[in-house]
Amino acid sequence: MQDKHKKLLQWFSLNFIISAVLLIVSVLIFTLIANEAVLEHEKIVDDKVFSFFDSIVTPGIINIMQVFTFFGSAQFLLPAYIVLAGYFFLRKKYINGFEIIIVGIASQALLYGLKQLFHRQRPNLSLIKNITTYSFPSGHTFSSLVFYSIIIYIIGRGKWKPVYKWITSIFLLLFALTIGLSRIILKVHYPTDVFASLCLAVAWVISCNWILKRINKKSANILLGRDEGANIKTKDSTHN
């Protein structure tokens, strides 16, 4: 009975409650944006945000945003995923390496599926030409936040001092958000594409974290059971 209560308390810890609330809120906001901006073609928010940035953006800012947007592209993220997974494989942490690969592939599959589902065309005034993929949700924004969240998670489990972990994590989070901002300033995405992608990424990261933790816990219990069984057999053979 006590074990059941302990498991229940673990499930409803503060961390779990915060994560669950964030997940639900993120999904609801994503759904709301998808309905209003994509299905109902409501452009009030997009027009106001575009108008605001038109009034403050300079050619210099555009050049800087073109640099930032590269770090959310497939040309950067694909090699980055390979390097990150390879690092864990070299350290013989195969589970971590495979988890990174699975999250990366699953993320792109989800993104592709949603783009094909909504079929939203890109803004007409895009500053980057010859983009043939659909606009909703923003792939750069979603992929960047997922990838840099993985880095933040790895740093969080490392041996750095807490202050360095916080500084680096905040920097990476702001970096990912700036990549999303660059997609608006360069007008390759509507602002609602980016806002929705941020919500989608938050929900996706939380879901992946829960799933992987659950799988790892089951694997650990299986291995623990095997070890205990082996120890019992060893003791029995010793007594015999």
Image (tube, rainbow, N blue to C red):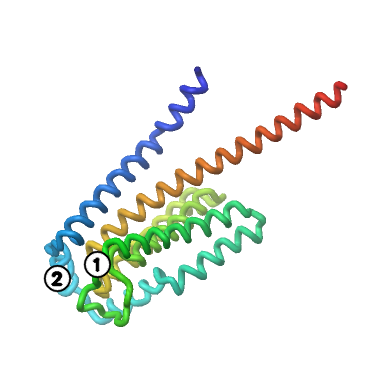
**What's the residue at 33%, 62% (across, down)?**
177
Residue carrying label 1 = 120
Residue 158, horizontal then vertical, whole percent: 55, 51
Front residue of 11 and 149: 11
Q: Is residue 235 above or below residue 158?
A: above
Q: Is residue 176 above or below residue 65?
A: above
Instruction: Write down the quadrant of residue 11 in the picture.
Output: top left
Label 1 CA crowd tier, 10 Å (few <14, some 14–19, many 20+)? many
Q: Is residue 1 above or below residue 146?
A: above
Identified by mark 2, the residue type is Ser
Q: Secondary structure at mark 2?
A: helix
Instruction: Write down the quadrant of residue 25 in the picture.
Output: top left
Of the numbered discs 2 and 1, the one sitting upstream in the chain is: 2
Residue 184, horizontal then vertical, whole percent: 25, 69
Identified by mark 1, the residue type is Arg
**Residue furthest toward the top?**
1
Q: Quadrant of the C terminus?
A: top right
Q: Which mark is residue 51?
A: 2
Q: What is the CA distance from the residue labelled 2 to the residue labelled 1? A: 21 Å
Front residue of 130 and 77: 130
Residue 52, horizontal then vertical, whole percent: 15, 69
